[in-house]
Amino acid sequence: MISEPSRYCTVELQALPARIGQVRRIVSAQLRHWQLDSLIDLAALGVTELLTNVHRHAQPDKLCTVELALLLDRLTVSVRDNDPRIPDVAEPDDTDDEFATSGRGLAIIEAMSESWGVRPQGEAGKTVWFTLQAPSTPVAVLPHVHAVHGATTDGPLVDAVPLGAVPIGAVPLGAAGLVESAAR
């Protein structure tokens, strides 16, 4: 059974508006390098939504890690932050403005991804992840190809550490350790 991703990339950063654009470009370049051009728009949109949530809501800081992992035909994109509070999808009600330009991040993730969820990390924070179906054309697999990038307000990080506990692939509803998961 294959249990390790064939492709892996991680970026550690402060989720500030200028950094979010940089990470979008890194994600796009990495997916282009992996010949997954068809996933660039969705992955960049999803990363933007998750990083915007970290920027707006995460406490006590905005430090986070973005991870891309390709396992067989599934790309998992995750963002880990230091805030243990679990987000929930905003449910529209009669007072919500249907034309609102914010507050819909996880609803967008739910609509554009194959599956998504939140993995609590106790008091250390949480990881919000989503999966995208990779194209069926074969991609050359190099064993343990890793790219590590770091960007903070203080400069590059020397010790960027991959997450390791992020679920890879679709996870059934109600799976242990997951707060929310949606699969089509």
Image (cartoon, helix red, strand yellow):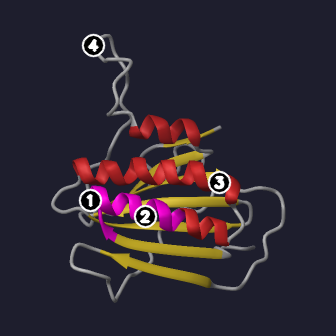
Q: What is the spatial separation of the Cα atoms under label 1 and label 4, in whole angstroms?
A: 30 Å
* SS for callout 2: helix
Residue type at the position of mark 2: Val
Residue 160 visible in the current orientation: yes
Residue type at the position of mark 1: Leu
Q: Nearer the viewer, mark 4 or mark 2?
A: 2
Left-right relation of 178 to 123: right
N-term-proximal mark, 1 vs 3: 1
Q: Which residue is mark 2?
A: 23
Where the C terminus falls, by quadrant? top right
Q: Position of residue 8 (x, y in %)?
A: 58, 75
Q: Residue at x 47, y 74 (%)?
A: 10
Q: Is residue 17 magenta?
A: yes
Q: Residue furthest top?
A: 94
Q: Residue at x 60, y 55 (%)?
A: 40
Q: Give whichever of 86, 95 is nearer the camera.
A: 95
Q: Which residue is mark 1?
A: 16
N-term-proximal mark, 4 vs 3: 3
Residue segment shown in magenta? 13-27
Q: What is the spatial separation of the Cα atoms under label 4 and label 2, in whole angstroms?
A: 34 Å
